[in-house]
Image (tube, coloured by chain):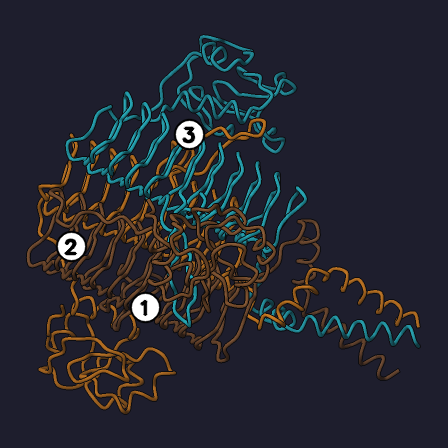
Chain colours: A brown, B orange, C cyan
Amino acid sequence: MSRPIRLADLAAAHGLELRGDGDHMVSAVAPIERAGPEAISFLASASHRPFLAQTRAGAVIVKSADAAACPTAALLSDNPYASYARIAQQLYPSARPEPGVHPTAVIADGCRLGAGVSIGPLAALGTGCVLGDDVIVGPGCVLADRVELGAGSRLVANVSVGEGVRIGARALIQPGAVIGADGFGFANDGGTWVKIPQVGSVIIGDDVEVGANTTIDRGTLEDTVIGDGVKLDNLIMVAHNVRIGAHSALAGCVGIAGSAVLGQRCTVGGGVGINGHIEVVDDVHVAGMSFVNRSVATPGAYASGLPLMPTREWRKNMVRLKQLDELARRVAALEKQLKNA
Amino acid sequence: MSRPIRLADLAAAHGLELRGDGDHMVSAVAPIERAGPEAISFLASASHRPFLAQTRAGAVIVKSADAAACPTAALLSDNPYASYARIAQQLYPSARPEPGVHPTAVIADGCRLGAGVSIGPLAALGTGCVLGDDVIVGPGCVLADRVELGAGSRLVANVSVGEGVRIGARALIQPGAVIGADGFGFANDGGTWVKIPQVGSVIIGDDVEVGANTTIDRGTLEDTVIGDGVKLDNLIMVAHNVRIGAHSALAGCVGIAGSAVLGQRCTVGGGVGINGHIEVVDDVHVAGMSFVNRSVATPGAYASGLPLMPTREWRKNMVRLKQLDELARRVAALEKQLKNA
Amino acid sequence: MSRPIRLADLAAAHGLELRGDGDHMVSAVAPIERAGPEAISFLASASHRPFLAQTRAGAVIVKSADAAACPTAALLSDNPYASYARIAQQLYPSARPEPGVHPTAVIADGCRLGAGVSIGPLAALGTGCVLGDDVIVGPGCVLADRVELGAGSRLVANVSVGEGVRIGARALIQPGAVIGADGFGFANDGGTWVKIPQVGSVIIGDDVEVGANTTIDRGTLEDTVIGDGVKLDNLIMVAHNVRIGAHSALAGCVGIAGSAVLGQRCTVGGGVGINGHIEVVDDVHVAGMSFVNRSVATPGAYASGLPLMPTREWRKNMVRLKQLDELARRVAALEKQLKNA
């Protein structure tokens, strides 16, 4: 799956300074403590520095300050982890299906397919879809009418995209994702629910990744908007009218309720719930399993998950928690009593 | 996507009193603060009343008490939000595929299709399925044997329905939903699990909506039952033997464990977990990210989500929370000491 | 759906002692309080013992200590629930599609299909897939290149499996599951994310069940590993590099972050979140809606879900919770003051 390359060529391709034998070939990436001579590794955090002296890697990507301590070839980078990511991309190019439309795919009228487009077996495109160059629509994907996919985007398999959804360039949409289903909007009329048509769409920027079985609903009147470079993990729920700022990254099982606005460069841990109609500014970092119950106006780190306890202790503490307001009142009473004493 | 209509015709169609020019045409709905003359809007909550005087909307749906303050045409309704929903449905009729069976669909033996049924490309129906009039089975949907779909129901795309599942009239099932997978039932035998066959089914009433990638498992011996008018958002998990009462609405990422019973007209916020084998009465409203760990016998509002804190404060508070029982004992000791003093 | 059988034959097939008429036929399983003469039931817990004297069941599976109290035929078992599960499997054999490849399925070059394999309508297999005997690939399933499925495994419908994933024997994969999507790995480079290729795979042992719309990501460099006999419910997220030990069972909506290790024979309740890069030993049992924020080194029962409160009480208690550290300090100050008094 990987292709071998000379260290000197790697260094040149990624603009890194090489210390060591430029003719050495590497064909793999591996963790620094397990890498062999055919592998390139990296040193990103101080906690792994003890492994450097013993590494058997063919080369290690390091900051220049660590170059002297590297017993093998070193590639110098200001950001070894990012350089490693790019080198790994080069060593392990993702397999691309052949261009062309598989005979079992169904393409409705009026679709425009760019150069190099690949439509896999048993995929279905509605009328008037527009696919940029090199788009890949994998097996079992369903596009409704008038979907637009930017150049280089890939829908892996069994992805569903609703009417009129627009996805930018170089998107990677993992299997089972659903983009552009109806938002959840109903008016209550004497105890029953009247559906509110969801006539907005979903607009996704460039370089977005959407995880497996993640769902992004269409807007009610306006659009649900996912900014450039946003990365969404699996089983995330993005409700109608939500806006996610550029380069934010959300881990698995996050739910964002309707009309919430999340800023740019935010990170959201797994299992977090974000309330509807709130606004979170740029550069907010929310720990896993938190509940963002209110707007966040100040960048920084936030949390609210309850830590694990042995069940017996948990039970006792939770009884007290349900009486916490009363406990606080009792403490205040004691303080008053002592002050008056 | 929308179709223009005279205000007088709208008023007549929805049984509303019109104040203003009946010949004015509207073709869109829009928020009151952004609507132009071609759009109809509504005033549902007092918080939006300041926008009424300045609105440029072609018409506004208001309660009669607000009619005098409306600077443009007014449609009088006791429930402006519900009237707005119905008018929006009329202005934005959902696109229907042509009736007929797409040549790439696979229909097994013994299926009965009502008048006007549309089976999309690459859909597969098992043996003996029964589809009422005007049912739409979208692209990529898979129905196992003996599935029944009531008149006017629509499975949008890539929906999976298990053997013998019965869905009522006018259902709307969003992409990726799975209805009738096996419930999660295993007996432990000396450390390994023995599967308990899940021989019940799923029975869904009329006018139910099921969100994208939501899953509803079949019952173990009896059926999992979803009442009339229930609305389920995306990525909800309904386990085996659960019963959800009519007209309840559940937001995204809710999980309901096995054999739980939820009453009628309940609302459940996003991310809520509901314990198995408990019973929640009618008219209970649970806030997002709560844990319904016990039965609820009294209608009303409930919650248990932990509010967000800056991580530094969160850390300190959580250390204390794990010692809360001890803290309460210390307070009691202080009280005793002071009483004796 | 079920097939009638003589009690004597059932007893012999399952190695159980029969007390009663061996010629009596049963054709169903039912709860002890509702079973009729055609049904077999079981008594697993003391709480159901009051129903035993009145049962109308054709036979009841009981521990030998309960045999005397059984008013009808009794099958004696050390583990009535497990015996019941196996007998139910015999009475309700799951319907198998006919062997063969449906004409609408797409099988790429180089696949090897064992004896009795069934490939359903509109399924797609990539190149070089290897399917053991009696494998069932249901309608709409998509296998990428070089997927391996062990003998007797079944993918029900619309399942997506990524390149090179290996699944053991007798797996049951419910609809919509995604196995082998890319893990969520990115390096941050000056505010934007660089994708880290996910070149590991997913390796699943024998006798594993994967629930509807559950996702299991492929590893970054090494593999994500699911042990023998593991049972995963619906809408579970298993991130890259996770290892789940044999015979662990996870309920719906659980999320496990990257590189977490879960031991053998663990049980995890619904909605639990498990942090990345932690290790949970064998025989740990986590209650629903908990947050496993740290490694767990001791077997036993753990929890952290916040119990439900009426919203008014919840609000007051949460205000106090956010000040809990301060409250604890005030209690300490009172203690000091009284000690000094």
Mark 2 to mark 3 CA distance (whole Å):
45 Å
Chain assignment, label 1: A
Q: Is residue A26 visible?
A: yes
Give the residue displayed 29% in from the left and 23% down from the top: C114
Callout 2: SS: loop
Q: Which mark is residue C148?
A: none
Decide which of A85, A188 is in the foreground and name it: A85
Give the amino acid type for the residue marked by disc 3 in the picture: Pro
Q: Residues within 10 Å of mark 3 (few under 14, many from 20)?
A: many
Disc 1 target residue: A226
Left or right? Give the position of A222 relative to A259: left
Question: Can marks 2 and 3 be said to lie on one chain?
Answer: no
Residue C191 point in image, percent of width and height: 41, 72
Give the amino acid type for the residue marked by disc 2 in the picture: Val
Q: Residues within 10 Å of mark 2 (few under 14, many from 20)?
A: many
Decide which of B151, C211 is in the foreground and name it: C211
Front disc: 3 or 1 = 1
Disc 3 target residue: B197
Give the amino acid type for the residue marked by disc 1 in the picture: Ile
Chain assignment, label 3: B
Disc 2 target residue: A117
Q: Is residue B284 visible?
A: no
Give the residue displayed 22% in from the left and 82% down from the top: B35
Residue B307 point in image, percent of width and height: 55, 69
Mark 1 or mark 2: name the one nearer the start of the chain. Answer: 2
Q: Quadrant of the N terminus of chain C?
A: top left
Mark 3 to mark 1 CA distance (whole Å):
43 Å
Give the residue displayed 66% in from the left and 41% down from the top: C299
